[in-house]
Image (cartoon, rainbow, N blue to C red):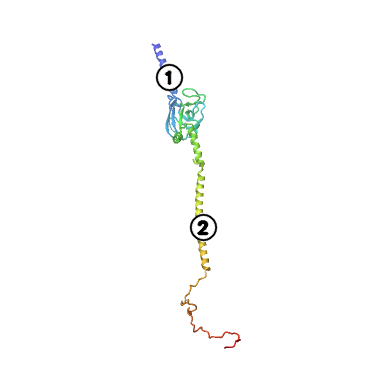
Amino acid sequence: MLAGVVRRAVPLTLVSLSLLVAPSLADEFTNPANSYLDLQKHYKLGETYPITWVTSLQYITLEIRHWGSTGATVGVLALAIPNSGIFDWTVGEHDNVSGKEIAGNSQFKFVITDPTGKINSSTTGNGFSKGLLQSRGFIIDDTTSTSTTTSTSSTSSAPASASSAPSKTSTETSQTAAGVTDGGLTQSAKIGIGVGVGIGALLLIVVAVGMTVFVMRRRQREKGVLAANETPVAPALEYGDKLPEMGGYERRGELNSQNYSMPPSELPGHPDTHPRR
């Protein structure tokens, strides 16, 4: 009888011990879940996702690091907060994750540490490795860079690979910043040419108007000089015409023979040398 009780008590004791140990074996991330393969999960920059985990720690510190055994810390999402098992993460906010960071290395992971120090770098087991509870590796996509690359590739006449598209975009951007156009002239040069042509045309118009005015005035002056130098010619008078009035007297073309007759006079001569017959 006593032996049967002892045999029953031993299995119960083992079950109780297994229940006490079981919670510590459940420390893990549930999103991204361990059922994913490393780098299978993708997140998008600017989107919000719930990050969940299960751990027996009362307080946790949640970090995001680059994926790999020696991945450097990128940012701290939560520092020494009570363990709620969930954190709403907006990619790119308060985590130092930027387009530049993604371009350098787009592979990341989550890490939970114990801020109390009970679990430290010497602790391994129960989901922790050297004091770290790590998630599966995942990839963050920079959607802004992807849309820019897609639009650039669609406007190009020849297809471009994903690696060549950013370089093409940067080249076009630098050319646009420098003001280079398809014709080989800068925008400032085109503006200068347009202004120069406009000023030149205006100057030609001014010169043409000035020359016209100068010639017209010169001709008027020449006509005035000729008119001043000309002597008026009196019209020819015929016998009996009335002369123009001068000084209030009138003169007629017809002469009075009586008024202007002269008495006869004998011309001087030599005395007769021959006697009259």
Residue on which disc 2 sits: 211
- Asked whether 36 or 163 is in front, the reply is 163
CA distance for labels 2 and 1: 114 Å
- Asked whether 259 or 206 is in front, the reply is 259
Res. 236 mark: none
Query: Image point 52% across, 64% down: which residue?
Result: 222
The total of numbered circles placed on residues is 2
- Asked whether 159 or 97 is in front, the reply is 159
Locate the C terminus and report the quarter of the image it occupies.
bottom right
On screen, 88 above or below 12?
A: below
Mark nearest the camera among 2 and 1 is 2
Graded by Cα atoms within 10 Å as few (under 14), some (14 to 19) or many (20 or more), the crowding at tag 1 reads: few
Residue on which disc 1 sits: 18
Query: What residue type is disc 1 on?
Result: Ser
Image coordinates of residue 48 in percent, x first then y, are: 42, 33
Q: Secondary structure at mark 2?
A: helix
Left or right: 257, with 3 as reference point? right
- First in sequence, mark 2 or 1: give its number: 1
Image coordinates of residue 157 in percent, x first then y, are: 45, 35
Query: What residue type is disc 2 on?
Result: Met
On screen, 258 above or below 60?
A: below
Q: Quadrant of residue 267?
A: bottom right
Image coordinates of residue 236 in percent, x first then y, are: 48, 73
